[in-house]
Image: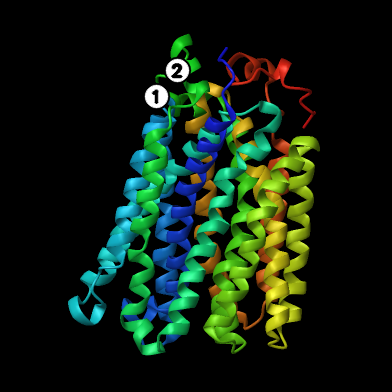
Amino acid sequence: MTTPVDRKSLVKAFAASLTGTALEWYDFAIYSAAAALVFPAVFFPSDDPLTGTLLAFSTYAVGYVARPLGGFVFGRLGDIIGRKQLLVITLLLIGVTTFLIGLIPPYASIGIAAPILLVLMRFAQGVAVGGEWGGAVLLSSEYGKPSQRGFWSSAAQIGPPAGNLLANGTLALLTLALTDSQFESWGWRIAFLLSAVLVGFGLWIRLKLEDTPVFKALQESGERAEAPISAVFRTQTRPLVAAIMSRIAPDVIYALFTVFSITYGVNKLGFDRSQVLVAILIGSAFQLGLIPLAGAISDRINRRLVYGIAAVGGVLWVPVFFLIIGGSSWPLMILGIGVGLAFHSFMYGPQAAFVTEQFTVRLRSTGSSLAYTIAGVFGGALAPLIFTYLLSRTDSWVPVFFYIAAVGVITITGLALGRNPDLDEEEKFAAVPAATSGEVPAR
């Protein structure tokens, strides 16, 4: 059993977890926006704009498809060498590849080599991200009380809106400061090159932090897993399936409101690019507070209930969203995206705690990373492609809604399959023993 940690260490762990995932999602946000607005012309020139968009979104999907490889490699390392060392490696890899994307010459300069380099960089990012999330969640949650895991583990979950906020804020400023031709020629590259600032800050925090008390306890007890990947598939099959299924709807709904809404709003409804980006910016700003709030609420109320209600609400909001933005009203676009991201927040806030609680302590890094990355392939990777394909074939948002309704059912099923945390195991390895930290409510 480990000794209690001071609040300063808790705050450092929270910040270290947040900065890495913020960089991850800063990259994904600028990439998704660029894939919708710039990459079709820069890297995939075509007479048909929709074809170019589909090709650009295909490279977006490569980042998700590569994640399971990262989950296998880095998730395993997190259970063997520790959470801190893992997160230093992944942060560097994400940052370097994001920076290099900003330097890739256009198709007009080097031909087919341009999209090939883009795909390679995207693949490398995906591998790094595959290990980042699981390690980041454990870095913050393993410093705190089991009864407060929903709040502390939400640090990694704040990363997406924080990164999205930074990315869309940067893109909005660039689109306002530059002409369309300047932005499409070189302005978009600035957003990628600025990732170096986030990398430096994240490394400064992570290198100063010790590994988690829980991992130290595993080292002292000699219970670290020697073959964590095979152990997860052999002994944690139901938890893995439950965690994967629970993650799909949040990914798809997030892709709708932060990725596809740009394409739909600009190309279908005639909004200015900056208008949609600002709407996403506002919704992301509210998520910064809503996600940790949702995590804290899930510590006091049944975690799966909070998650499930938000999933149902998110699905039901989709047709409302499309109906209210149909008149091309910008205030209604802001409202539609804002409410959609609020529902996402109440899924995403409890998600990290729910996923990590599915696995035994000695297999948490591997199990959580695999669940996160495998779900990403079926959720976030395919969603923008499916949205764009359905719109191109039917010219209607109705099939999009039915698709989201189907993934909502999958997520609810995953929540139902999930297990409650093992409190005996929590007491053995928790930084603050469950027996002395107050009542741990039933999940």
Any part of residue 45 in sight: no
Q: Nearer the viewer, residue 141 or 240?
A: 141
What percent of the width, then of the height, locates residue 51?
43, 80
Q: Is residue 256 left or right of residue 171?
A: right
What residue type is disc 1 on? Answer: Ile
Q: Which residue is mark 1?
A: 80
Numbered disc 2: secondary structure: loop
Q: Residue furthest top?
A: 221
Instruction: Determine crowd level at label 1: few under 14, some 14-19, many 20+ residues with C-alpha closer than 10 A.
Output: many
Report the residue at 72% width, 16% height from top: 436
Judge from the rendering whether residue 202 lies leftward or rightward of residue 275; answer left or right.
left
Is 236 situated above or below 46? above
Q: Residues under labels 1 and 2: Cα distance?
A: 7 Å
User: What colour scheme has been applied to the protein in the rendered image?
Assistant: rainbow
Q: Position of residue 187 (x, y in %)?
A: 35, 78
Q: Are marks 1 and 2 in contact (CB under 8 Å)?
A: yes
At a point 49% along the width and 46% down the height, the residue shown is: 373
Q: Is 356 or 417 nearer to us in this picture? A: 356
**Secondary structure type for disc 1:** helix
Residue projecting furthest to the left:
110
Quadrant of residue 391 within the rendered picture: bottom right
Q: Which residue is mark 2?
A: 224
Quadrant of the rendering where the C terminus is positioned? top right
Q: Nearer the viewer, residue 388 or 120?
A: 120
- Above or below for 184 versus 119: below
